[in-house]
Image: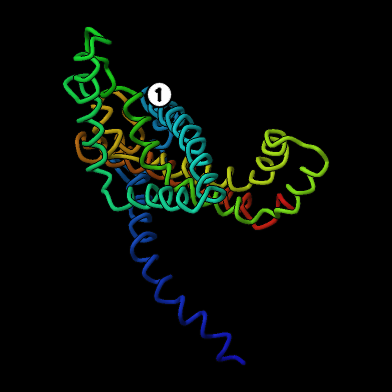
Amino acid sequence: MKSDKLKPALLLGPLVLFLGLAYLVPFLGVMQWSVTLPEPGFSQYGKAVTDPLIQSVFFRTFRICLIVTVCAVTAAYAIAYVWVRGTPAQRLVTELCILIPFWISVLTRAFGWVALLSNRGLINTWLQAAGIISEPLTMVRNEFGVVLGMAHFLIPFAVFPIASAMRSLDERVFLAARGMGASRLRIFWSIFVPMTLPGILGAGLMVFVFALGFFITPAILGGGRSVMIAELIYLRLFQSPDWGLGAAISVILMLIVGALLILMLRLVRPNKMLG
């Protein structure tokens, strides 16, 4: 019996060791920088909290991440609905549309959006050729391009928890609602959406957490005009260099992400909100 109890621990041991060496040890080093550079103390944390520039970057990051979350989850809900409840042909096409983006790197996608949205990109070229606009629209090097690129990347991640929540629904509930005379629209808004709320919340928190750490997409599509917190950390560590302040910002960001992950785990426990 003891050997059976020890097997899971032995199997998980190498994984825990790897995670500790790959993530925990470097993070402890970053924490050490935050309280030792340029001099011992917590002055860097005070600066990170009170500096107007850093506060504006945090505010911009949270605003962009919130907009991205709403856009990505809304699009993912529609995609997941077709994937779960569509015809076999619709499900196949939707599944391909979900999986194919995972085969394309984030860098390739970002430059693809630049090719589409820049002043001389395909969209502006087509609109000008059609006579719809006289001057190119500014769609990159601003928050619009950042939001579009981030939402495009994160939509597939939001689809899975929403689709999982949709697949767990009891069809007898909808049959009973139809038997009571409820319309399809009423069933959707009054029954279907509330019952999939755990998946929506889980997808929203997942997208928001992922978006907080985005670097490549905002750097390319924002063009330095919509700096987010990950890019600010990079600038402080490699451009300034101000390692202590960059490390303090990193620790604060990690604490925020950790708190959100704990919240996500509590919200998406099976049957917590459905039971």
Q: In this view of the protein, which residue sits in the foreground, 63 or 207?
A: 207
Q: Position of residue 236 (x, y in %)?
A: 26, 36
Does residue 245 sit above or below 261 in this rendering? Answer: above
Image point (72%, 41%), residue name: 191
Q: Which residue is mark 1?
A: 56
Relative placement, left or right, of 256 versus 246 is right
Determine whether 250 is above or below 119 in the image: below
Q: Residue at x 21, y 24 (%)?
A: 118
Disc 1: CA contacts within 10 A as few (<14), some (14-19) or many (>=20): some
Residue 107, located in which quarter of the rendered image?
A: top left
Please tell me whether residue 92 is drawn above or below residue 248 in the rendered image.
Answer: below
- Residue found 33% across the figure and 51% down from its top: 100
For badge 1, the amino acid type reads Ser
Q: Please identify the quadrant where the C terminus is shown.
A: bottom right
The one of 131 and 138 positioned closer to us in this rendering: 131
Q: How far across and how far down the image is residue 99, in percent?
A: 37, 52
Q: Where does the image place residue 72, in percent across and percent down from the top left?
A: 46, 37
Task: Determine the residue positioned at 80% across, 38% down.
Answer: 181
In the displayed structure, would residue 221 be above or below residue 168? above
Which image quarter holds the N terminus?
bottom right
Q: How many marks?
A: 1
